[in-house]
Image (cartoon, rainbow, N blue to C red):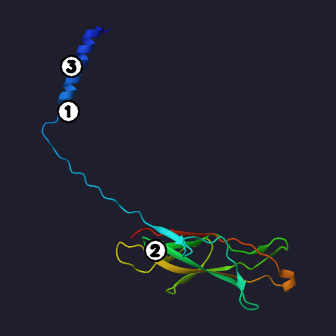
Amino acid sequence: MVVKMSFNKLALLLIFISFISQAEVTIHGNKSIEIIGEVVEEDNFEVTDGNGGWYNELELKQQEINSPYQVDARVHVLSTNPNFMVTLQNIVVLRNDSKGLSFAPAEVIFSSIQGETKKLKPMESQSFTNPDVPVGADSEGEYTLSISANAPIGSNQDISGAYVGEIALIFEPSASD
């Protein structure tokens, strides 16, 4: 079956449908709509050297003969949620490639000024908590990152030189309460 319709009849049909559609969406009266919005502040999480930056290089020094080489670095943590995690990503080894020597793997300790001290081990997250603050305020905590390592065994002449290593840490906020 073939249906033929002239252009005029099709135009009338479309106009008729158009009137029906318009009649269905006509709004009568004056209605006010109240829109309420809430601005939610994002969580803050910032780890710095205490001066707004971060360390490019840390130098381990020996305090006494036959003692480990060590360095202490200040770490400032600002966080909306006081709980956070620290993960050491690698074994820290200082190497002198030209001599083929290396320090013993370094011991890495993260501690708060309140006395919470934890040894960081590769790929094992350790949890820490900033001091309590009033509700709605960000928490801030002061910490110390301590790195110490024993030099290779040998005479000073045999082991002297520049040693280089890398430490990779991940700081991440814990899930909000």
Relative vertical location of residue 35 with respect to residue 83 in this rendering, above or below: above
Q: Earlier in the sequence, mark 1 or mark 3?
A: 3
Tell me the residue that label 2 is attached to: 83
User: Which quarter of the rendering shows the N terminus?
Assistant: top left
| SS for callout 2 | strand
Report which quarter residue 96 is drawn in. Answer: bottom right
Query: 10 Å neighbourhood of mark 3: few (<14), some, or many (≥20)?
Result: few
Report which quarter residue 163 is drawn in. Answer: bottom right
Q: Residue at x 46, y 70 (%)?
A: 174
| SS for callout 1 | loop
Distance CA(mark 2)–CA(mark 3): 66 Å
CB-based contact (under 8 Å), mark 1 and mark 2:
no
Query: 10 Å neighbourhood of mark 1: few (<14), some, or many (≥20)?
Result: few
Distance CA(mark 1)–CA(mark 2): 54 Å
Return the mark for residue 61: none
Tell me the residue that label 3 is attached to: 16
Q: Amino acid at mark 1?
A: Val
In the image, 144: left or right of 31?
Answer: right
In the image, 147: left or right of 115?
Answer: right
Tell me the residue that label 1 is attached to: 25
Q: Residue at x 77, y 82 (%)?
A: 151
Q: Amino acid at mark 3?
A: Phe
